[in-house]
Image (cartoon, helix red, strand yellow):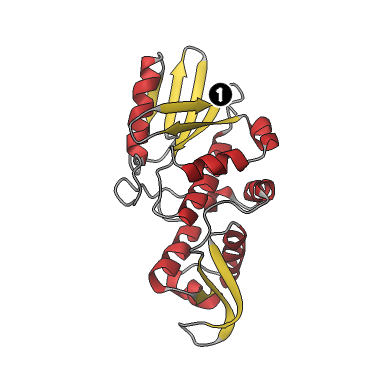
Amino acid sequence: MGQTNQDKILASLERYGPQCDDCLSESTLVRPRQQVHQICSYISRAGLIERIRNRVCPRCHRRKITNEINRSGDDLPRKPQSIFDRAASEGLNDLSERSRNNKNHDVEALSEDEIKQCLEAELRRQGWETEVAWGNQQGIDIDARRGQERWIIEVKGPGSRPPMRVNYFLAILGELLQRMDDPEARYSLALPDLPQFRRLWERLPALAKERTGIGAIFVSKDGAIEFLDR
């Protein structure tokens, strides 16, 4: 799966630095410009970027609202329920982050494919048959079946910085919601066992977990697996 428009915007801000919406539209080829405005407004509320009013854009040298990567954020905003609900209503496809960072991370944690390998081995040990989407392969990350039971698992790697992990967490929630077409299936997200991912899961409202039925799986760097139903 190619980059989403959100991915393109974040990548451009990382590479070229602060930009206004017009310059971002030109550097990313995301059009119309209003789409850039909508995406930047959303991801600024999620804490991934900052939108600064009445600032000179370094690219076009005009005084506008500029966007830049938020280097200080390390968690969801203080009202995670509103972020969750907004994600569900504003288009979860644009939250999808499918770049597989098997090597491009700076923490001691397993990559996405390594987490899949651990989970596949454990699920098979428990009697599940598994279909795994490796690397950039599209589809459900892990689709496990055991008799009449079905377990759908979406997996993310560690990311390279705190704001990226917030993005990954929101993305994996969105991907699971889009998979929910089997009322009998069990649904879980799987993440590296890092403190930030733990906090993000804990701060997701209990009501959201209860209504969606989503569980969490944390996999440590030594391959230990913890399953949390809700």
In the image, residue 149 lies at what x, y percent?
Answer: 51, 16
Residue shown at 37% from the left, 40% from the top: 112
Residue labelled with disc 1: 185
Residue 206 image-quadrant placement = top right
Task: Identify residue type, mark 1.
Answer: Ala
Helix, strand or loop at mark 1 = loop
Q: Which image quarter is the C terminus in?
A: top right
Residue shown at 50% from the left, 24% from the top: 151
Q: Nearer the viewer, residue 123 or 146?
A: 123
Q: Is residue 62 left or right of residue 125?
A: right
Q: Is residue 1 left or right of residue 200?
A: left
Q: Nearer the viewer, residue 1 or 103?
A: 103
Residue shown at 43% from the left, 42% from the top: 156
Work out whether residue 103 can be spotted: yes
Work out whether residue 173 can be spotted: no
Q: In the rendered image of this protein, does residue 103 appear above or below residue 225?
A: below
Few, some or many residues within 10 Å of mark 1 (<14, 14–19, 20+): some
Residue shown at 40% from the left, 20% from the top: 123
Q: Nearer the viewer, residue 79 or 94?
A: 79
Q: In the rendered image of this protein, does residue 100 appear above or below residue 219?
A: below
